[in-house]
Image (cartoon, helix red, strand yellow):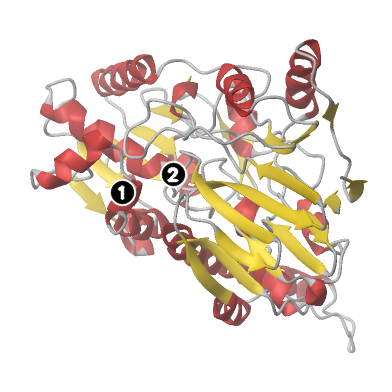
Amino acid sequence: MKLSFHGAAREVTGSCHLVEIGNIKILIDCGMYQGGGGLSEENLKPFGFKPKNINYLLLTHAHLDHCGRIPLLVKQGFRGEIITTSASRELAKLVMLDSARVHEEEAKRSAKHFKRSYKHRKKSKHNIQPLYSTLDVLNSLDYFGHNAVYEKPIKLSKGIQATFFDAGHIIGAASILLETEEGKSKKRIIFSGDIGNKNKPIIRDPVPLPQADFVVMETTYGDRSHKSIEESVSELYLAINDTFKRGGNVYIPTFALERAQELLFFLREGVEKGKLPRNMQVFLDSPMAISATEIYRHHPECYDEEFTKLFRNDIDPFYLPTLTYTRDVSESIAINNIKSGAVVMAGSGMCTGGRICSHLKHNLWREECSVIFVSFAAGGTLGRKIIDGAKTVYIYGEEIGVRAKIYTINGFSAHAGRNELLQWHKNIGKPETTFLVHGAPEAMASIASELKVRGHMVKMPKPHEGYSI
C-alpha cells in the first residue's frame, strides 16, 4: 500500500492525499490552493497522478481548500465516484459554482487587459481561459455517488471500507477512517480532515475516533490555542457597541460557510439578551453566505443539542428583525449610504476579493468605523496586511489609509487549536506513524516537536512525496 501527498507546503494548502491499495486508487480531498500571490499558477500545475486512474474521491468537507479542484479533476479525466456526506454535497455544489464564477470573471479581466496591452498587434493567438467553468462544475456533480452517514461503514471494494466521523468543523465535515485488508495484512488509516473547535454553537464537537495504524492530521493552528468562545463573544459585543458610540459602522470580513451563520447566531442572542442595540441594522452582504444559511437549515442531523432545541421551539437561530439579505450588487452598493449603526458582514474572509473590498475602500479610512476580523487570513492577503498593522493598503488600485479601528478576535475559529489537536491525537492511541499536513511550517513543527516528546513517529511530507505503509 502506498500513501502520497499532493497538497502544497504552504500556509493555506490544497488538501489532496492519494492511497493506492493494489489496483484501487482512493483520493482524499481535492482542494484548491488559497492565500497570497502565485497560487493561480500552483492550481494549474499537474496533480501528480492521472485523474482517469482514480477510483474513488472521499471528500472530508466542502471548504474550497478541500473541494475546489474537483471540477478540474473531472475535466482532466476523473470518472470514479465521489463520496461525502449529504450536507457536504450541497455545500460543495455551492462552493464550486461560486469558484467557477470567480475564475470566469478573472479570465475576462485578464483577457481585456491583454487585449489593451497588445492592441497594436494585429494577430495574437493568446487565449486566456478560466481554471474551470460553470459547465465543468455541473459536469463534476454527475460523479457524486453515495451520501455517507456518520459512523456507518461504506464498502468501496473487496477488503476496503471507509467510515465518516463527525469532525465538528462545519456542517457535514468528517474525519475518515479507511480500513484495508490485503491477504493477512490489515491497515487502519485516519484522515483528520479539518478538526473542529470545541464548544461552538450550531454543530456538535468532534467525536472520538477509533485507534489506527496511521494518522494524517491537519495542523492549521498547531502553534497556538484559541480564546474561549464566551470571551470572544464578549469582545465582539464590546467592539460593536464601542463603534456605535463613535458614530460608525462595523465591517466583518466573513467566510460564507460556518462563520457567517455563527455570527448571525450570536448577533441574535446579543439583541435578545439586551447586550446589543435592538435597532442596529445587520446586513449579510454575500449571496453565497445567504445560500449557505439556507443549506444549514436543511441539515438538522448536524446540529448540537442546544441548536436543535431552538428549532423545536420554533425559534430561527439566524433571524434578527433588522437583518437584511443583500443578493443584488445594487443593494450592496446602497449600504455605503449608511454611515452609522450598521453591522455589515461580507466575503471574502481574507479580503482577497468579494464585496468586503468595496466596503473597505469606502470606509477603511473612516476613524469612527471598525473592522473586526474573526477569521484566519493567510500571509500576503489584504486581510493579513490590515491585521499586521499596515498604515495604507491598495484596493482596486487605489491607495487607502487604514484609520478605522481594527479588531482581531480569534476564538471564533472553526479549527481546533493546539491543545485540542494534541488531545485529538492522544485519543487515537499510538499509531505507527503520524503524517502532519495542512499548516504553516511553524505550526507543523510545533505539533511535531510535542508528538516526538510523547514518543510518536512523525513525518512532515513534502508535495508529491510518497510512503509505503
Q: Quadrant of the N terminus?
A: bottom right
Q: Quadrant of the C terminus?
A: top right
**Total marks placed:** 2
Residue drawn at 38 percent across, 62 percent down? 329
Q: Which residue is mark 2?
A: 359
Q: Amino acid at mark 2?
A: His
Q: Which residue is mark 1?
A: 335
The image shows residue 354, relative to residue 408, as above or below, that is below
- Give the class, few, some or many, for how many residues have Cα within 10 Å of label 1's Cα (few <14, many ≥20): some
Instruction: Classify mark 1: helix, strand or loop.
Output: helix
**Sequence-first disc among 1 and 2:** 1
Q: For the view shown, which residue lies furthest in the top direction?
A: 453
The image shows residue 261, relative to residue 408, as above or below, that is below
The image shows residue 240, relative to residue 73, as above or below, that is above
Residue 19 is left or right of residue 199, and the answer is right
Instruction: Classify mark 2: helix, strand or loop.
Output: helix
Q: Position of residue 337 (x, y in %)?
A: 29, 46
**Between marks 1 and 2, how big is the CA–CA gap?**
9 Å
